[in-house]
Image (cartoon, grey):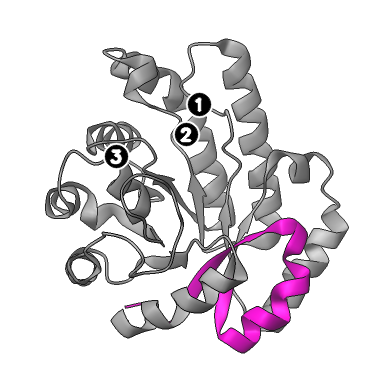
Amino acid sequence: MPETIFVHVPYPILRENLDYAAAAGICPEVFLPAEVLDGLDTGELAAVAAEMRDRGMPCTIHAPFMDLNPGSAEPLLRDATIHRFRQVMDAAAILLPRCMVFHPGYDRWRYGSQQEEWLQRSIPVWEEVVRRAEEIDTVIAVENIFEEEPSTLCMLLDAIEAPRLRHCFDVGHWNLFHAVGLEEWFERLGARIAEVHIHDNGGTKDDHGPIGCGTIDFPLFFRLMRQYAPHAVHTIEAHSHRCLEQAIPRLMEFL
């Protein structure tokens, strides 16, 4: 199981929370949304990256995702997605993350039977991202969002067939949308998991609560993690300090 625990941190509050992270023994998963990327001071970013390296603090990155879709049927939306993905890869060349999380952009309510068409439009976008990942020695992990079962993610990973393109399993999202159990999901994608996002909910709202506040079977989840992906990055996705302070010790009980 991992020696390092990562925690979701938006870039605007990253630097002010480095002391807290160091004291808590955690490392940042840096979220870089669109408004940050458009105004990014690369000199400041390099200074933050150097400070983290001086502290012996690795990072991961969560890429922008709102309204982005690499397989969109609208060419202008694909162009916007490519632009954002290029921006975040430029930032990654400075931060040098262990792993980068991207949303796939697919949901069956919009695309229905056009799964293959969505996939073919998205492939060139992911191929470019993977090439950049190889240059900076990082891994791209595609996260489940609205997926009820893993077939679309399997199709994407099979189509690219790149060791650096893998899966980020978000157990909270699985609990909201799943039509298959944890064991079936891990049987199909467990060996390709590079990162997991850990948070709990009651199955009706994306609460991002600490382990134990919802209905997820975490003993089973961690047993499957030890079986299929023992070296994956573990990231807590808490949206407040209060939840984070509860989430850290509850996670450590399993690790």
Q: Secondary structure at mark 2?
A: helix
Instruction: Work out how far the residue at label 1 is from the one at label 3, CA to CA, in angstroms.
Output: 21 Å
- Of the residues under marks 1 and 3, which one precedes in the sequence? 1
Real-space Cα distance between discs 3 and 2?
24 Å
Residue linked to disc 3: 177
Spot occupied by residue 140 in the image (x, y as percentages of width and height): 46, 49
Who is closer to the viewer here, 51 or 132?
51
Residue at 59 percent of width and 55 percent of height: 136
Please report contact status of discs 1 and 3: CB closer than 8 Å, yes or no: no
- In the rendering, which numbered label is found on residue 70? 1
Mark 3 secondary-structure assignment: helix
Q: What range of the chain is rendered magenta?
A: 1-27
Q: Residue 4 lies in magenta, yes or no? A: yes
Look at discs 1 and 3 and give the one toward the viewer. 3
Q: Quadrant of the N terminus?
A: bottom left
Give, as a three-letter code, the residue at label 2.
Answer: Trp
Q: Which mark is residue 126?
A: 2
Identify the mark nearer the N-term, 1 or 2.
1
44 on left or right of 192: right
Q: Rounded to the nearest whole Å, what is the CA distance between mark 1 and mark 2?
A: 8 Å
Q: Please name the amino acid that badge 1 sits on.
A: Pro
Report the amino acid beneath label 3. Phe
- Is residue 45 rendered magenta in the image? no
Q: Quadrant of the C terminus?
A: bottom left
Q: Which of the two labelled residues, at mark 3 and mark 2, occupies the earlier sequence position?
A: 2
Name which quarter of the figure residue 67 lies in. Answer: top right
Image mark count: 3
Residue pictured at 52% horizontal, 69% vertical: 243
